[in-house]
Amino acid sequence: MSLEGFEVAVVGAGPAGSAAALTLAREGVQVLLVERGTFPGSKNVFGGRIYSYALKRLLGDQWKDAPVERFIRKEGITFMTVDSSFSIEYEAKDPKGSFTAVRAKFDKWLAEQAEKVGASLITDSRVDDLIIEGGRVKGIIAGQDKIPTDAVIACDGTTTSLARKAGLASILEPEEVSMGMKDVIELPADKIEERFGLEPEEGAAHVFVGECSGGLRGGGFLYTNKDSLALGMVVGADDASTKAIPSHTVMDRLRNHRKVKRFIRDGKTIEYDAHMIPEAGPKMLTRPYTGGMLVAGDAAGHLLNNGYTFRGVDMAIVSGVAAAQTILEARKRKDYSAQSLKAYERKLKEEPALKDMFVFSKVPRYLRNHRLYSVYPELICNAAEAIYRVDGNGKRKIYKELRAQTKGKVSTISLIRDLLAGARTF
């Protein structure tokens, strides 16, 4: 493949990069999609859930060909102490709103869709630097190859080196990053369906809060695939570092809790992964554009964790499309200056699917409250125990029981303050 004559280089063949490349190639743009892994998805790790709307927009009915594991029918959250748990479950009317996927399969498939409409994909190629002339990005440097282009879209992940080289980002502070860990546990499809009360092709998504994080800021998750479970933890990197708690210890807490053990019993762990997750959101960059370059996906903080839902792939796809549309407009004007590409920032803020990043921008700060992971799960479980227990000694009314459970654990003022802050944040 000749590495000359490309108009746009897209770095990173994850969902953002492939969506951008596909959108550009459809319009006849000569686009090069560069992936450092042996194939798209080979180096990507995530829990396994994707919200369908973004693919429907990008591909129309063709999205149904995506390598879906299971459509999410059941949503749940469990608050846990060492020896008890309290769960809430919701069963969706339409399970097609989201699905689980294996990232190695999904990313490869999406990149193939970009190739089908004309994008050129190269793998096993690490982009080390940018070609910068006159203060504007004019291409990429991959190993010994200098590849001049009119524009670059950087989709190179959380630790984005390209955004830093372009002066758009600095190294993230520990409190701006979480550490994600995940087991893939092999389990027959019929056992998954029996344990979660599912029909074939239906799936479940579950969140765990409390004992599993050992007091660290964070929580657990579990997603069902066709014949495996994705079980993992996300904890604050600053917490884990300060308290010197190894990642395997955190995962052991989750694996060994009796609520979780029932789900994974007799399963075989066939994969273990860990990666860093940015929490700063769009603020991780001074701005998502510069002359000749845009930044999308994880590299631009385009993901959302509001405690009960984790979103990344859908926002990556939408931001990749927005980046491509901005480039198409600039191409018509033959103007790739920073002033021209500034339209990208406006698109991100006006896009309904991405507005959630700004609506819930205060969530990360609220989630730094350690009572959420220690005091409150214990209160919820203890209150449930008292409410449901019948031992012949008489019972208090629920509101009196709740008041009694808070005594000595959290002051009324702190409780009210946390409730009000949560109401304003969510």
Image (cartoon, helix red, strand yellow):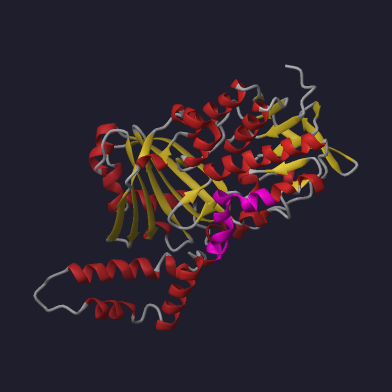
**Looking at this rendering, what residue extends furthest in the front direction?**
332
Who is closer to the viewer here, 328 or 193? 328
Residue 196: image location, x then y, percent: 27, 43
Name the quadrant containing residue 293. Answer: top right
Residue sitting nearer the eye, 328 or 184: 328
Is 134 colored magenta in this rendering?
Answer: no
Left or right? Give the position of 395 relative to 414: left
Place of residue 321 in the rendered image (x, y in percent of width and height, measured from the top left): 62, 39
Q: Quadrant of residue 131?
A: top right
Q: Name the residue furthest top.
A: 1
* Residue displayed at 66% across by 27% down: 25
Magenta span: predominant SS is helix
Using the rendered image of the protein, determine whether residue 256 is visible from the camera's viewpoint.
yes
Eyeballing the image, is 190 above or below 122? below
**What is the x, y in percent for residue 159?**
65, 45
Q: Is residue 25 above or below residue 91?
A: above
**Residue interval drawn in magenta:** 346-365
